[in-house]
Image: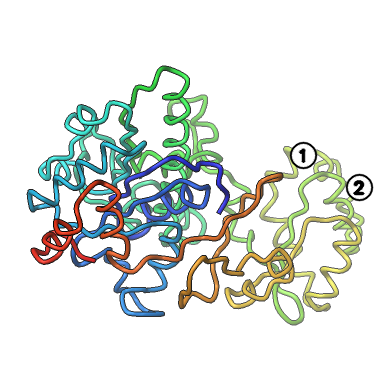
Amino acid sequence: MYPLLKGLRIVDITTIVLGPYATQILGDLGAEIIKIEALEGDMNRSTPPHGAPGLGAGFANNNRNKRSLCLDLKAPDGKAILNRLIGTADALVHNMRQDALDRLGFSWEVVHALNPRLIYCAALGYGSAGPYAGKPAYDDIIQGASGIAGLAARRDGTPSYHPMVTADKVAALHVVYGVLAALLHRERTGGKGQKIEMPMLEAMAGFTLNEHLMAATFETDGATGYHRTLTPNRRPFPTKDGFIALLPYTTQQWRRVMTALGRLDLVEAPWFNDNPARSKRSGELYSLIGAALGDKTSAEWLALFEELDIPCGPVNSLDDVLRDPHLTAVGFFEPNFSAPTPVRRSLRQAIQCSGIAVEPDLPPPALGHDSKALLGELGYAAADVERLVAQRVVKA
């Protein structure tokens, strides 16, 4: 981890991917993340495969650099512990339905009165001011509602989901920059906390429509959809032994590609040398490239296009990515944990900072791994800690 946020304490009441991925990034940047878990733990702990009991791969990849405090928040003593912890924190992040957290006694109004400096970030499915407020939301639901699944129908005739939890992870990035911006604002304006809402639908609608708003940017009934990315011919191009990714973009790059493919007739065509006119015929040009690469191997084409300075690259399987020479050279998968763990590959934080020494990461914690230590830090006597554990208010 990088100690950029050292000294900041964040209470993490999140599960599955959206919230844990966001708080893991904040932990990677040096914040102290205290993960509050119910007695049964984050649901992702049980998702296989497992490296140890309670350590599923999905949990491991979203919960390093955290401490685990396991509480029964329905018990008065459990509520009291969390209240005491919140009083010491800089931020609280949750992805529960807001009414559920309110019923437990941790609404924004209650928490703000307890700690006026606290940044309170609610990662919700939908903004509280709209008619969908309070509805349950998961990645597939938001991919459907935000237009992502429908984009595939524009291209292929049938809607489909991205084969990854796109909505959760993009929304998580919004949580990260929202919390960081609010913390900076607090320091610049006298220390007053604030509530942030990060609704998944709004985050993903903006993410999806960024390049697809098109004419609707200027016209109420304008056409949406960026034609270049919606042509069915925009796909990895087949070669003699596989596929490559290729994207000539500038006029000069297109001229070099078509010259290499022997299409000098296109190189001299007026429409081909005009960027707007050429862009409108992207599908036609992609189809031409796709039909032309079958006589050489991927390695041969990549060598040629690299020599011509054309953006290109391999089409890797997930297993290929694990062996990618660049990612291997930068140590992207090498664990850097401070204690033994079954984790043999860890997805390193991509941000690299100069002049700051990297510190060891905390391994994904066992359920309640830090409960006793944290209660001691909050001022609970050892006898009281043992009583709370025996009463199953706390799991350690």
The residue located at (26%, 40%) in the rendering is 86
Quarter of the image where the N terminus is located: bottom right
Residue type at numbered disc 2: Glu
For this rendering, which residue is in front, 138 or 305?
138
Can you identify the residue that label 1 sits on? 275
Hey, which residue is sitting farthest bottom in the picture? 241
Residue type at numbered disc 1: Asn
Residue 319 percent location from the top left of the image: 59, 78
The residue located at (39%, 42%) in the rendering is 9
The residue located at (77%, 80%) in the rendering is 240
- Which element type, helix, strand or loop, lies under badge 1? helix
Name the quadrant containing residue 88: top left
- Which element type, helix, strand or loop, lies under badge 2? loop
Colouring rule applied to residues: rainbow
Q: Is residue 310 left or right of residue 325?
A: right
Residue 347 percent location from the top left of the image: 55, 64
The residue located at (55%, 35%) in the rendering is 214
The disc placed on residue 268 is: 2
Residue 55 percent location from the top left of the image: 36, 73
Hey, which residue is sitting farthest top in the picture? 189
Residue 261 visible in the snapshot: yes
Q: Is residue 104 left or right of residue 164?
A: left
Residue 49 visible in the snapshot: no
Q: Earlier in the sequence, mark 2 or mark 1?
A: 2
Name the quadrant containing residue 51: bottom left
